[in-house]
């Protein structure tokens, strides 16, 4: 049985869905640009400590509801900071919905009392996407890779950062850098991309593969948890809509004895989280009264949300189809990705872009990358990547760069969670924002220019040119041996990486 499970999970992803022709036609009908500013303002966040601060500001500003969806939340320092902020918001009566990928919930949160305490709150719900279970053994490959926060139908933050010390806070070792986009709705709840993200969240929250943990009492007016719901293990819910009316907790949902018992059980954790939150307010003094949302953001003409689908199953390459479509009339295309792992259709896409545009691909150098699988596949596939006609820049940044972005000429920027690999293309849920803003494009172009200076440019003819800030690093013999072994091992597994 275990052999069958392994074989299914390893070989099923070899079958990749073809591009969707109906979606291709829909792209032709979609307006990705506008001549005037829309109803949403944006801010680009590249610094890890700023990324934590803006999340805390958003949570501190919440009056009615908070959604946090993340691939990897850990009970480390920054992860617990977020739990403390969410717990404080829940204490004030804010509705909390937390959606986490099942594998990382199992690996990093199963033993966290603070996480369990938040899930036990009456106005707190935790959804686990495709949790590890005997029933789901044949679906282990299909993960939720989304990362976003939504607050009060007013603002959201979306990008590529996970919720842990690697990506958040003022830490200087064992970290990656990434990018988030903060979006503030200035159209009184009518911001187009905000509405699309909220609809996307409801869709994924209602997927059969999402198991719900909740501290609420189930009654006729509460449709957030099924009759069979089990708070300790989570239960499948046929309808998981929020148990609120106009943002106000439903008065009929009284705290049951069981819920009260849970609250008492976690009293120590609640006190600890409140003390932690008090420390956060001392460190970041404006997280509850920050008000410069307008001044600290810039206008965007248009923002379009793109996703790969919400089900736990094989995906159609919708995100890559969108990037390919948008790039067809561009003269300059820059792709920032931590690593590149392509199949035939993906190589064909790069070939097609490079046939009419100057295509730059910026990725982590093998000597600096934090993902050994991606680095090893690059060693195996480097010639194929260069033969697409792309100029490849092997980045030697001070810390690995986890950023996912595509720049199209000087106007469109595509930012989010999508890596240029087969997992992001065909297996995982992914979210990208297509943003029409020359100012944002210019900001990101400036960052990419710095990265290029720290890179070694490699061309298909074998020519290599080191940037002005490139710092050579030589792999030791242990690393060379490690990569040499991996180059053999990963060949039949690269569709999973």
Image (cartoon, helix red, strand yellow):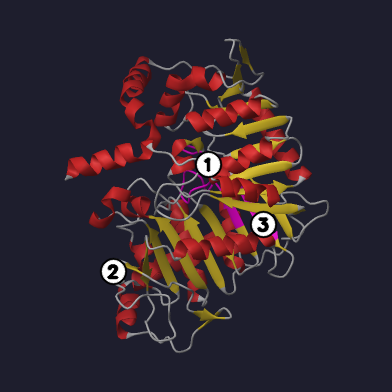
Of the two numbered discs 3 and 2 on the same chain, state the one appearing first in sequence.
Answer: 3
Q: Nearer the viewer, residue 12 or 229?
A: 12
Q: Residue furthest bottom?
A: 252
Is label 3 in contact with label 2 (beta carbons under 8 Å)?
A: no
Looking at the rendered image, the quarter that the C terminus falls into is top left
Is residue 257 within the magenta segment?
Answer: no
Q: Is residue 281 visible?
A: no
Query: Does 473 sit above or below residue 269?
Result: above
Residues at marks 1 and 3, CA–CA distance in whole angstroms: 30 Å
Q: Residue furthest top?
A: 462
User: In the rendering, at what x and y percent does residue 272 appear?
Assistant: 40, 66
Of the two numbered discs 1 and 2 on the same chain, state the one appearing first in sequence.
Answer: 1
Residue at the disc numbered 2: 232
Q: Residue furthest right?
A: 36
- Callout 2: helix, strand or loop? loop
Residues at marks 1 and 2, CA–CA distance in whole angstroms: 41 Å
Residue stretch rendered in magenta on the structure: 157-184
Query: Does 317 sit above or below residue 109?
Result: above
Q: Nearer the viewer, residue 176 or 154?
A: 154
Q: What numbered label is drawn on residue 183? A: 3
Residue at the disc numbered 1: 19
Residue that appears at 24% across and 40% down: 6
Is residue 182 within the magenta segment?
Answer: yes
User: In the rendering, at what x and y percent does residue 356 appear?
Assistant: 70, 26
Query: Does 478 sit above or below residue 412?
Result: above
Of the two numbered discs 1 and 3 on the same chain, state the one appearing first in sequence.
Answer: 1
**As drawn, is 174 to the left or to the right of 478?**
right
**As drawn, is 145 to the left or to the right of 321?**
left
Q: Nearer the viewer, residue 221 or 166?
A: 221
């Amino acid at each position: 049985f275990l052999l069958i499970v392994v074989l299914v999970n390893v070989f099923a992803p070899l079958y990749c869905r073809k591009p969707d022709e109906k979606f291709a036609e829909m792209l032709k009908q979609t307006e990705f640009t506008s001549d005037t500013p829309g109803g949403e303002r944006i801010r680009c966040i590249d610094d890890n400590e700023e990324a934590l601060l803006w999340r805390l500001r958003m949570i501190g500003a919440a009056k009615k509801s908070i959604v946090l969806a993340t691939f990897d939340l850990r009970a480390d320092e920054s992860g617990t900071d977020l739990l403390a902020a969410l717990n404080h918001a829940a204490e004030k009566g804010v509705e909390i919905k937390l959606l986490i990928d099942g594998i990382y919930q199992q690996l990093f949160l199963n033993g966290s009392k603070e996480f369990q305490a938040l899930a036990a709150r009456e106005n707190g719900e935790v959804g686990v996407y495709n949790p590890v279970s005997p029933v789901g053994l044949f679906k282990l490959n299909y993960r939720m890779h989304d990362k976003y926060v939504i607050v009060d139908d007013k603002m959201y933050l979306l990008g590529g950062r996970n919720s842990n010390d690697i990506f958040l806070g003022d830490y200087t070792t064992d970290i990656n850098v990434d990018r988030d986009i903060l979006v503030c709705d200035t159209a009184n709840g009518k911001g187009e991309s905000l509405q699309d993200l909220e609809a996307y969240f409801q869709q994924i929250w209602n997927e059969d593969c999402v198991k719900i943990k909740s501290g609420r009492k189930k009654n006729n007016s509460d449709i957030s948890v099924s009759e069979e719901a089990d708070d300790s293990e989570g239960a499948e819910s046929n309808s998981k809509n929020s148990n609120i009316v106009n943002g106000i907790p439903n008065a009929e949902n009284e705290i049951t004895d069981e819920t009260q018992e849970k609250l008492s059980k976690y009293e120590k954790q609640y006190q600890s989280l409140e003390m932690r939150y008090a420390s956060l307010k001392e460190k970041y003094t404006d997280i509850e009264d920050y008000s410069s949302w307008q001044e600290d953001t810039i206008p965007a003409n248009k923002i379009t949300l793109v996703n790969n689908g919400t089900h736990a199953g094989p995906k159609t390459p919708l995100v890559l189809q969108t990037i390919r479509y948008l790039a067809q009339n561009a003269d300059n295309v820059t792709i920032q990705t931590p690593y590149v792992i392509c199949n035939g259709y993906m190589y064909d896409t790069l070939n097609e872009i490079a046939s009419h545009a100057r295509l730059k691909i910026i990725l982590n150098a093998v000597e600096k990358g934090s993902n050994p699988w991606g680095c090893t596949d690059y060693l195996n596939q480097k010639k194929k990547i260069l033969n697409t006609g792309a100029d490849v820049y092997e980045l030697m940044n001070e810390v690995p760069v986890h950023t996912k972005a595509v720049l199209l000429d000087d106007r469109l920027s595509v930012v989010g969670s999508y890596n240029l690999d087969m997992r992001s293309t065909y297996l995982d849920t992914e979210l990208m924002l297509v943003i029409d803003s020359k100012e944002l494009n210019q900001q990101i172009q400036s960052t990419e220019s710095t990265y290029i200076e720290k890179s070694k440019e490699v061309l298909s003819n074998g020519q290599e040119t080191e940037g002005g800030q490139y710092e050579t690093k030589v792999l030791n013999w242990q690393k060379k041996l490690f990569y040499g072994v991996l180059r053999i091992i990963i060949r039949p597994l690269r569709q999973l990486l």
